[in-house]
Image (cartoon, rainbow, N blue to C red):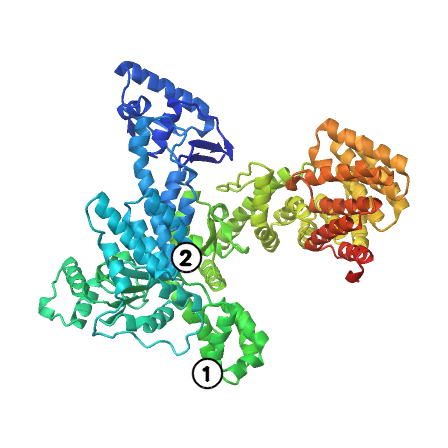
Amino acid sequence: MNVEYRVLGRVEVLRDGVPVPLPAGRGRVLLATLLLRPNRFVPVDELVDRLWDGEPPTVDRAHKTLQMVVRRLRVALGDADCVRTATGGYLAEVDPERLDLTRFRRLAADGEFTAALAHWRGPVAADVDSVLLHHEDVPPLIEERLVVLGRRIDADLARSRGAELVDELRELTGEHPLREGFWAQLVQALHQAGRPRDALAAYEQIRAHLADELGVEPGQQLRELHERLQDPEARSDVPRQLPAPSAHFTGRDAELAKLTALLDAGTAVVIATIDGTAGVGKTALAVRWAHSVADRFPDGQLHVDLRGFDPSAQPLDPSAVLASFLAAFGVPGGKVPADLPERAALFRSVSADRRVLVLLDNARDVEQVRPLLPAGRGCLVVLTSRNRFTGLVVREGAFPVTLDVLAEPEAVALLTARLGADRVRAEPDAVADLVAFCGGLPLALAVLASRAAGAPELSLRALADELSDASGGLLTGVETVFATSYRCLDPDSARLFRLLGLATGPDVSLDAAAALDGRPRSAVRRSLHVLTRMNLAVERAPGRYTCHDLLRAYSQTRSVAEDTDTGRHEAVRRLLDFYLHTAESADRLLRRTRVALTLPPLAEGVHPALLADRAAALAWCETEHRNLMAAARLAGEHGYHQHAWQLPTTMFGYLNFRQLPSERIELCKVALAAARAAEDPFAVGNTLHSLGNALGALGAFEEADTAYAEALEVREGIGHLHGIAVTLDQWAVNQARQGRLESARSLHERAVRRRREQGDPAGLAMALNNQAMTLVALEDLEAALAASDEAYATITGGGIDHLLPSTLDTRGLLQLRLGRVDAAMDTFHQVLALPDDEVPNAVRAVTHENIADAHLRRGRAAEAVAALEEALLMREAQGNARAVIRLRARLAGLVPERR
């Protein structure tokens, strides 16, 4: 069961996505009061105040009424009850990830301001009738939101989006006319938008407003911003400690532009944090950029390697670093205090009237960095680290820049700079392989380039082949860099890092990672946070994690070295269990008629994702289908044959709905190999039938015939009655598509007979509908109409709504053939009016073709062309080559210029 609690808007409780009816009046006030103080004890007296707005009845009566309100609330919540009794009061016990308020705070603390603000659906507790709650509890939350909103706007300004922000900030300054932060941001936004006069006018507007309303001048931030707009010139300098830039630096144009834009942010001290995985080029970028803007900081440029992850040395003590900084500004050693706070204070005093650039390279953590921050207006701090410095973002307003690997053109440029254009141009395929193997990681590319440069007789193809064979020890240096971060992990996070290398899909969700790991979800979330902070994993989307290929390879190396084969095998089994059981739940929602599967039991600690409805099932499959395909292959590789054939089987409903026959064929072949390896005839028959369906959908009709014939033989051999009927029905459809109508008629009759014997209404309706289509092609319209009528009556009488689209389309086709064009058109439009998730793409495409035929019957060629073009777009998207050829031929016959 998945329960979610919401207070940032109307107070709501959702159980598996469905709203739980909540009591009105005092019950809602009670729930809101507790949820606004999650996991905190709230005394009875405070609750009484909230429930009666500070005017309770007698104490005894109030306490008894409160107890009754609590009971009613618990009954209403049912198994979503979060109310806990404590001595003298109550509390709401909720997982922080299940309450929008705590999620908002967590995302804000992580610097994910846009995602945090998305949790606000309206005024806090908008449907709660309590004057006291809205007077005392809500205002602090509104202030929290405004602070985070300000942080988000700062981030947007750092990305030079000032022009986009002007309208929003005009509105905010109108709503909060005395909030100077929004006015400062408006001035910056106007300045970025190239409207300096408007920026100065905005400053004068807030200055006059403050003088009229409060009798005060603008604060320091606004005044300094105003001075900068009027006089951007700076003063003279001394120390120049920047290291030389890399001679082979390439690319990073977007990051350089983003960093340069920060200098217009207008804050007293600009702090840029460049984070990224080991070897991604953080230092090279920082040094290159620092040199490009050094002339803006004439009072000095300081640099230090803080050795935060040096394998041969301890991280530098900030006290020692401050001593060197102070000496650079001419402070005698005898005047440097011994105490760290005093040294930091002296450095701030020395830098207060200077514009200084400080490059802090390879920082370990916030505690090492914070004492080294200068205080002068217009100072710049550039910080590089493998860690993300969320604390600096939240407290000091730092601007984070996460560095990713090089794009392919940049990576090729790096190799070209090292090896020469002629050598790189001579072997483009080998160069592409080298770039792909290194995942665009500059350090890895540099190691390879050095090896190649030192051995000019070695071809790049030979080097690429050597890498693919994992020989030669070429990446020892890179692995050493990774190892320094890895050794800093706690044991649980290190184990999760090793296990992530076992997952072969493009990413893993939090739920999948928890299954792989076997620990509780909350504990795994903490470890994932550690890994992303250390840049050993990337959160590519909220709640979805991955790592670059080199890191994956390194994690696999560590797993082989540190984990037992049994432990690795069990982790794979847990991951496969998660995907299989969740995919089975999704398939049940997507396909109401299907072969029942007996799944392997869930391993301990595995919790499949909860899918509330068909839409949720589709969304999950959309997100996970590449991971599911990878999981099916992984299962075969590890000898989990049941998983290997059942995973594809549970995906067929989704793949059929989305009309992805090529992927389905690929999965069928994986499943068939596993089914045969397991010597499971049920699985073999099931998979052969699915392979026939997929081949038929792709127009490979003869290959589909072979698969159906073998499937029927296997299913008859084990007496699988449902399977026999299904295969007969689909084989008949495949025969009809090839024009073998008499053979199709015979197979249909056998299928309908089997369905009647089974007493399966849904199966009978499908068989009758398919039979009607073949009878139409045979021009036996009366028999076709009888079959269609029986199918329609069976569906409507049994409430089998999911079969309605195909049955209606067949009825429309019959009506059209019988000359009832208006009725046919109405029926076809009934199909298209059904919700998208209820009509398979193939049925929708066929319906558009049938509509085209109806238009042609009426002499409306233009409308027919429009309908055929719609069908063509769908068939092209589905990859149905034969249907595409046929439709293009039809269109060419109607529109000569298409020929």
Outermost bottom residue:
457
Between marks 2 and 1 in the image, the one whose residue lies nearer the viewer:
2
Please report whichever mark, 2 or 1, sits nearer to the chain's N-terminal start.
2
Q: Using the rendered view, name the quadrant where residue 598 is placed.
A: top right
Which residue sits at x=80%, y=34%? 755
Q: Nearer the viewer, residue 89 or 517?
A: 89
Q: Nearer the viewer, residue 485 or 335?
A: 335
What SS does tag 1 mark?
helix
Q: Residues within 10 Å of mark 1 (few under 14, many from 20)?
A: few
Say which residue label 1 marks.
454
* Label placed on residue 113: none
Q: Nearer the viewer, residue 582 or 800?
A: 800
Q: Residue 418: x percent and y percent? A: 46, 80
Q: Residues within 10 Å of mark 2 (few under 14, many from 20)?
A: some
Q: Is residue 184 left or right of residue 438?
A: left
Query: Would you say residue 625 is visible in this rendering?
Result: yes
Q: Nearer the viewer, residue 407 or 626?
A: 407
Above-or-below relation of 847 to 422: above
Say which residue label 2 marks.
163
The amino acid on which the numbered mark 2 sits, given as a three-letter code, is Ala
Which residue sits at x=37%, y=55%? 155
Could you tell me which quadrant the C terminus lies in?
A: bottom right
Q: Is residue 198 left or right of residue 743?
A: left
